[in-house]
Image (tube, helix red, strand yellow):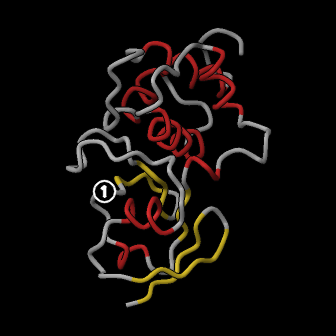
Amino acid sequence: MTYSLIVNDRAVEVGGPGLRPVLDVLREDLGLLGAKPGCGEGRCGACTVLIDDEPVVACLYPVAHAAGKRVQTVEGLADGERLTALQDSLLTHGAVQCGACTPGMLISLTALLERDPAPTDHAVREALAGNICRCTGYTQLVEAALAAAGTGGDAA
């Protein structure tokens, strides 16, 4: 079966079984390696992408359900070499360490800031609830998100 998707604003067609995870399609068919395979059970958030502006764990999301939808990966956030305010803020606040969780964190926080441009500390923490990080803890991530939103944290 063939499925049409819009990935990072580009129309693509991919083939395979309908239950094939979007994560596999992104990494194997499209060469987009930003979403990371982690637990394979939807618990760690390393594979988080946006599908029609909603964060989903791509390791569990079937490509058949993504047909006709917009998929955004971490590769689609920056404008060429120009990073988003959130990406800059994560770097400035030391919220990036090993990189395994970073793409999923960026996607989850991007979704939050798009629906709530002035989130509270609690809202940021809640948005990150599905993303596990073992390197930085969450303080720097929360500060970075609040600074990017201009609602708190250190000036970015």
Q: Is residue 83 left or right of residue 50?
A: right
In this rendering, the answer to whether 24 lies above or below 88 is below
Residue found 71% across the figure and 11% down from its top: 155
Q: Quadrant of the N terminus?
A: bottom left
Residue found 48% across the figure and 19% down from its top: 97
Q: Position of residue 54 (x, y in %)?
A: 46, 56
Residue found 31% across the figure and 30% down from its top: 132
Query: Mark 1 sits on what residue?
Result: 59
Q: Quadrant of residue 88?
A: top right
In this rendering, the answer to whether 136 lies above or below 129 is above
Q: Position of residue 134 (x, y in %)?
A: 32, 20
In this rendering, the answer to whether 7 lies above or below 155 is below
Q: Position of residue 37 (x, y in %)?
A: 34, 47
Q: Position of residue 118 (x, y in %)?
A: 60, 31
Front-most of residues 154 and 23: 23
Q: Quadrant of the C terminus?
A: top right
Q: Quadrant of residue 89?
A: top right
Q: Is residue 41 left or right of residue 18?
A: left
Mark 1 falls on what kind of element? Answer: loop
Query: Looking at the image, how many numbered discs can be counted on the residues?
Result: 1
Label 1 crowd (10 A; few <14 / some 14-19 / many >=20): many
Residue found 52% across the figure and 18% down from its top: 95
**Amino acid type of the residue tagged 1 in the rendering:** Cys
Q: Quadrant of residue 128?
A: top left
Direction left: furthest residue: 41
